[in-house]
Amino acid sequence: MVYEKLTIMQTALRQLFHWMPFLFGIGFIAPLIAQTMAYWDIPAPLGISRIAFGLMIGAPWGLYATLRGRWL
Amino acid sequence: MNEITKLQPGLEPGVGVSSGGGPAITLGQGDGLDAHTRRTLLQQERAIARKYSSNGKAMWPYTVITLGCFAMWLAFWPLAMLDIMPLWIGFPLSCIFAAGGYITSHEAMHSNIGRPGTPQRFWNEAVGEVATIILIFPFSMARMMHLHHHYYTNDPEKDPDYTDAAPGKYSAWYKTWLNRQPGVDGSIHHYKRVLERIGTPAAKKALRDTMLLQLFSMAFFFAMSWAGYAMEVALLWWLPRHIGLSYIRYWLSWAPHHPRTGTGRYDNTRVFRTWIGHWLSMGMQYHVVHHLYPEVPNHLTRSAYRELKPILEARGVDCSPLKD
């Protein structure tokens, strides 16, 4: 029982670290883009908010890094 | 004539075998030395190294610098968030703390700040634990992997740092970045695999510490960024970490071990000269001394090298890049 719980936890943590670049894209890159744009007073295109624009860049970029294994 | 030239008459300037001053059978350098000469040189080498070995009581500046810099780095956060300190001040200092932290941590890895059982041991461990937090690199992993690097230097299979190998300096800088990519088996990803393979309780603890520090740092990054402080995170932690890691990977791993072909005691590092000098290269020009005698602290490797130089040359180390 304890061993099963440990295995489930290990699997969950492995999955969490596997998807970490995607989470990093959402959790850090998106707000960084939005706040950098705000600092330089750059409006987001198409009338969307800066954070929405940041998410449009950060989430797919993080997904790309997760799937390809590289950020560039 | 010093002791070494007495042992090896062929080394004496201006006196060759043909002059009649040398032995009937010449004593070659490096592996060509006979057992008696090798033993005597080793004794002389050890006597010099003992003079420069660390003394816990004299290593307090490492502790003060580490804890002081870490306290400053912690203070940068509220100061930057409250607009008391501009980020252009905090950013370069955080880069210096990130890269320099590895040097003080490195002394702790070799127990140079406090040997087990001494009153300084607590500070040795404290310095180790604190110094590489900016690098998101726990002390337990750093120490274990670094000692493995010493045991198996330049072994393609067993040296945890072998993934830093690169044919030239530009590719070496590129590799410092490449090795940190999520799907590349280099840097900390490689360390994790090595620790899993080792599988001892200490290795498991190092893996657990790494996971916890990574989870904590990512949670901090995400929470702070969504709270409106993404630029502070970027310039006080994220970028300094990457710059610091690249800097130490290049100067502490690639430069002193290139081309990573030698696995012997005297050829697993190289003596080199760099235009950035002693301090900015973090003393790595004399890395041969560190691999021979890790108990010699970083700030004394240059002095120890100068005294050891004739012996190193007798053992076949190419000391020509450094004139002093």
Image (cartoon, rainbow, N blue to C red):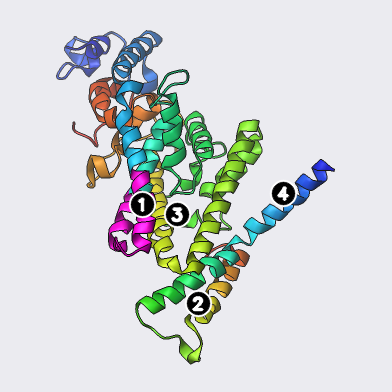
Q: Is B303 or B229 nearer to us in this picture?
A: B229
Residue at 29% over, 63% down: B86
Q: Which residue is mark 2?
A: A54
- The amino acid pointed to by label 3 is Lys
Which stretch did the figure color magenta?
B69-96
State yes or no: residue B77 in magenta: yes
N-terminal label among 3 and 1: 1
Q: Which residue is mark 3?
A: B175
Image position, residue B66 (x, y; %): 35, 39
Is residue B36 visible to the viewer in this orientation of the structure? yes
N-terminal label among 2 and 4: 4
Q: Which residue is mark 1?
A: B75
Q: Which residue is mark 4?
A: A10
Chain containing mark 1: B
Cα distance between the residues tagged 3 and 1: 33 Å
User: Mark 1 vs mark 4: same chain?
Assistant: no
Query: Which quadrant: the N terminus of chain B?
Result: top left
- The amino acid pointed to by label 4 is Gln
Check whether the beta carbons of the residues at disc 2 and disc 3 lie within 8 A of each other: no
Which label sits in the foreground, 1 or 2?
1
- The amino acid pointed to by label 1 is Ala
